Image: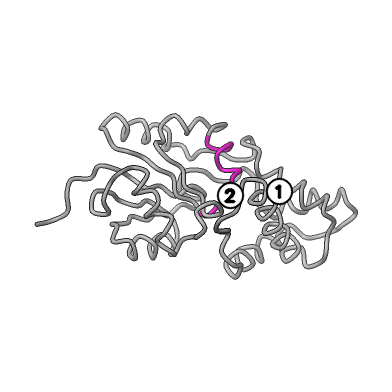
Amino acid sequence: MGPRPVAGLLLDAMGTLIGLRQSVGSTYAALAERHGIQVDAAAIDRVFPQVYGAAPPLAFPGLGSEELAAAELAWWGDRIEEALGQPVSGELKRELFEHFGEPEQWRTYPEVASQLEKWKGRGLKLAVVSNFDQRLHRLLEGLGLSQWLDAVVISSAAGAAKPDPAPLQQALNLLELAADQVWHVGDSAADQAAAAAAGIRCVLVKRP
């Protein structure tokens, strides 16, 4: 017997459903300048993917909400210093952290809302599964996407990050679906590896 009919989709967020309106480097450079730090935006854009890729998982098992928020800020604070190549103040770290938690800094890709509505109309259960933190809930709400979603799993609270399959498995539990009833839609090798480890079919979106 083959897999059962598709009953749900597990969707990555950044690079799949939403993207930044301005590059990480341009934002880091602009806010750093307010604190007397001169950095090159293009250089940050070049180094940031390496910094992010080499970082430990954005995942903190067993923390309460306040502890989790502090751990998320500390994790991103380390990435900020690595990207800027120097120690920076806690004030700048928090400014940057809060900046990227504002929905207006992000955009939904053009086809996403209509596609989510179409999938929901067909009776599919939808969950976002993202290697991100608690800010994502506000982003999805502010961008008008929450209305289509049955669940949101973030790595920081799940205690594991893709390519670990645990966040996808948590989403399956929330949707009350089996691995052969869903597809995972993402944009990275981590999405593909996590899906393979969870026994879930995967399709990758390749955006410019």
* Element at label 2: loop
**Which residue ends up furthest to the bottom in the rendered image?**
54
Q: Position of residue 184 (x, y in %)?
A: 35, 52
Of residues 100 and 34, the one nearer the viewer is: 100
Image label count: 2
Residue under label 2: 133
Quadrant of the rendered structure where residue 128 is? top left
Residue 202 part of the magenta-drawn span: no
The foreground one among 86 and 10 is 10
Which segment did they paint magenta? 131-140
Q: Which secondary structure is most common in the magenta stretch?
A: helix
Q: Position of residue 49 (x, y in %)?
A: 60, 64
Question: Callout 1: few (<14), some (14-19), or many (20+) C-alpha neighbours within 10 Å?
Answer: some
Q: Residue at x 23, y 45 (%)?
A: 6
Residue drawn where x is 47% and y is 33% of the image:
146
In the rendered view, tell whether residue 178 sits above or below residue 86.
above
**Pointer 1 or 2: first along the chain:** 1
**Residue located 65% across and 64% down the image:** 46
Kindly identify the amino acid type of the residue bearing the numbered disc 1: Phe
Q: Residue furthest left?
A: 1
**Image quarter of residue 200:** bottom left
Q: From the top left corner, tell me how far across and down residue 75 is, in percent.
A: 67, 59
Q: Amino acid at mark 2?
A: Asp
Using the image as rendered, state which of residue 124 and residue 150 is in the foreground.
Answer: 150
Q: Is residue 208 shown left or right of residue 194?
A: right
- Which structural element holds mark 1? helix
Q: Position of residue 180 (x, y in %)?
A: 23, 53
Judged from this view, the residue extending furthest toward the right is: 36
- Label 1: which residue? 97
Q: From the viewer's side, name the closer residue of 144 and 112.
A: 144
10 Å crowding of disc 2: few (<14), some (14-19), many (20+): many
